Image: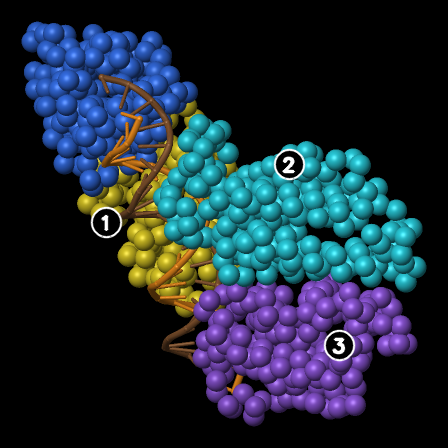
Chain colours: A cyan, B purple, C yellow, D blue, E orange, F brown
Amino acid sequence: MNDKFFDLKKEKQDKMINGAMQVFALKGYKLASTDDMVKVAGVSKGLWFHYFVNKAGLYTFIADYCVKYLNMELAVNLSADKDDYFDILYIVEETKASVAKIYPFVPLMIQAMEDEKDEEILEVTKSRITPYTEKVNEALERFSNENLREEVSREMLDMTVGYTLKGIREKAYSDGEFDSDKYLLAIREYFEMMKKIVYTRKADR
Amino acid sequence: MNDKFFDLKKEKQDKMINGAMQVFALKGYKLASTDDMVKVAGVSKGLWFHYFVNKAGLYTFIADYCVKYLNMELAVNLSADKDDYFDILYIVEETKASVAKIYPFVPLMIQAMEDEKDEEILEVTKSRITPYTEKVNEALERFSNENLREEVSREMLDMTVGYTLKGIREKAYSDGEFDSDKYLLAIREYFEMMKKIVYTRKADR
Amino acid sequence: MNDKFFDLKKEKQDKMINGAMQVFALKGYKLASTDDMVKVAGVSKGLWFHYFVNKAGLYTFIADYCVKYLNMELAVNLSADKDDYFDILYIVEETKASVAKIYPFVPLMIQAMEDEKDEEILEVTKSRITPYTEKVNEALERFSNENLREEVSREMLDMTVGYTLKGIREKAYSDGEFDSDKYLLAIREYFEMMKKIVYTRKADR
Amino acid sequence: MNDKFFDLKKEKQDKMINGAMQVFALKGYKLASTDDMVKVAGVSKGLWFHYFVNKAGLYTFIADYCVKYLNMELAVNLSADKDDYFDILYIVEETKASVAKIYPFVPLMIQAMEDEKDEEILEVTKSRITPYTEKVNEALERFSNENLREEVSREMLDMTVGYTLKGIREKAYSDGEFDSDKYLLAIREYFEMMKKIVYTRKADR
DNA sequence: AATGAATGAGCCTTCATTCAT
DNA sequence: CATGAATGAAGGCTCATTCAT
């Protein structure tokens, strides 16, 4: 990319970042079109290429930006003393929701990166998503499975919680705009229920 | 569409149906390409258009076919005496798995229809998926929420189970082919855990 | 390229070959545009890519075709008993002129390949032109420099004759169409003069 | 163009003139890009258009400048007493080589103008090159064809010498920079040979 | 009926040109 | 005066769709 992008007014940078992120997050790499971005960000076709060389370069930049920004925030929020499974995950989602105040499509973009199937961009996607995944998994390791009822395997818990969060996330964007509050509320309700049914009595607060 | 399609040898019909369904299910409406179908079904480009007029027509036909076939099977399997939440859902998935013996991509196609975002085909998709959703919901109404622990709301259960099944389904296709047994096993394990933690003692068998 | 190109009617093959060759020969690799070829050959934009993948692939095919065709003809015409400098070169040009009956832009295309400066296609160009150059040089080796007046160095003769032929060639296309007869006449006149002034009396017939 | 260009420091004027001339001479009108000129001359994109309105305007100015400057020098060097064909031509090339001390691409630019094929600029090119051609032809008229061996027609001599000079010229730029000495040496050698073989004994000095 | 050659609208990308600073 | 960010028309290439065989 062309580093002069960062010399632009922050406002315009963000307009472009948000525009590209929105289109990539909603449509995926292949179906994201320059014309869409022109419409969404109100910035001409040529300018995207002036700063980002080509579509793959733009995607790479956006993917990078998302993960770096999010991980930075997570580093602050995910203090080492948190050791409850759902509390940790809630902080992660809370962080995403807070990042979404400035970059509304970050939560969906992260999702889209994990789901991306286009071979042309797969390498990029996977390499950029890993640092985020690792950061979260690292934190989750602090949780002791002994707090789980014996009927509940950690593996299955990860699975169902992962898929459910993904579902809630996509639903949060279903009307076009991301409603941060609705999103966190849905998660809180879900997590509260889960705590009650998957923890041993002792762990269930 | 051109009804003469049904005069073709059943074998060829199915080769075309499966080919189109595979491509639509794996790639979605917009990214599904004529060339992909030619390769997968071994049927010439022109023939698709001869029978189905255009891409939208083909998609409509496949969507229709999926739902009708599945609902037919469900009508047989979903006997009115089943009233357990997970048993009903299991039968639904079992039915899909059995349909997949003949049309391997039906489970994923149903999923793809629910996830489809392309505006050009949205109307079609939504209208075709409804009959299936309704049939399942109808059956689920026979389940009494009183069997659920009070901490568990029916709404939240529907949500998490729905999203989790979706996840398991997509994973079952992750290596390209649908593994019916692995799919049903994963669901069974998940449902067994869920039964233990969401039912009241009484309902928990 | 797609070998099915050769299944087309010879007439259409030649229309496409001539069209592409004309545009490449007159404009060079970079400035040759698909639209030009559409206009000249009356064949749609997409078809070029159907058979030749991309612009570089088309250029490679045309370059190859030119040289192979020409060398084949030269193999017949350049009998091993010819040993006069200008006679050999005349046969070479005569051969080009005869090839031009079917592919009018071969002489100019060969020239264009030698002059091509676009880096993207340089490798292709140089590798394809070499076999032709070698064939001609091989034949010219049969000429003994002892036939030249001592004031005339072989090196300088090659230079001035080479540049002059190039000039005559370009002029022959200056009005759009290649006039084979005018071309050969100009060369004959030039060669006759040269023979008289560069050969020793003995060699001068 | 904007005449305030001449208010710039001579140094900057020449940087721009040389930059534009280099790019036009090496690439031709169509392939000469604004970005190339920015790189070569180190002058911003906008400034070119500020002074020269558009690409055609710039080309026109450069073409004009070349010919006027060269003709001015020729007026000084081409004294009316010179009447030998090759001496006159040598003076012309010597003049170009001397102009190249300040504007290194003038010889190639003159050449490029004669070869230019882009229709958009053809009119300009032809009209600007004429004054130069005429000046040279005028001088050459002082040469009497009676000095030529009868085998040598004046027409053919003009042709072969013209094309050969063109070839030598292009070769002189083949490594990117114009080597004035090598250029003049090559011409001298060529002319010496030619004098020996095209002049009658009497004229051959 | 069946094929795949042929078409052209649409998308990515380049580049002359404009314009705010 | 100078800059280079910004624009949009044009060129390469893809792909749904048409059509001659």
- The foreground one among B156 and A63 is B156
Q: Mark 1 lies on which chain?
A: C
Q: What element carries label 1?
A: loop
Q: Are marks 2 and 1 in contact (CB under 8 Å)?
A: no
Report the residue at 69% width, 37% height from top. Answer: A77
Looking at the rendered image, the quarter that the C terminus of chain C falls into is top left
Q: Are marks 2 and 3 on the same chain?
A: no
Q: What element carries label 2?
A: helix
The three-letter amino acid code for the residue at tag 2 is: Glu
Residue D43 image position (x, y, % from top left) = 31, 20
Q: Name the residue under label 2.
A: A73
Q: Is residue B145 left or right of residue C29?
A: right
Above or below for D81 versus B23: above
Q: Are marks 1 and 3 in contact (CB under 8 Å)?
A: no
Q: Mark 1 points at which residue?
A: C177
Q: Is mark 3 on a helix, strand or loop?
A: helix
The three-letter amino acid code for the residue at tag 3 is: Asn
Report the residue at 59% width, 64% height from top. Answer: B27
The numbered dot on residue B145 is 3
Whole-Å distance between the Cαs marked 1 and 3? 88 Å
Report the residue at 10% width, 11% height from top. Answer: D75
Residue F3 image position (x, y, % from top left) = 33, 22
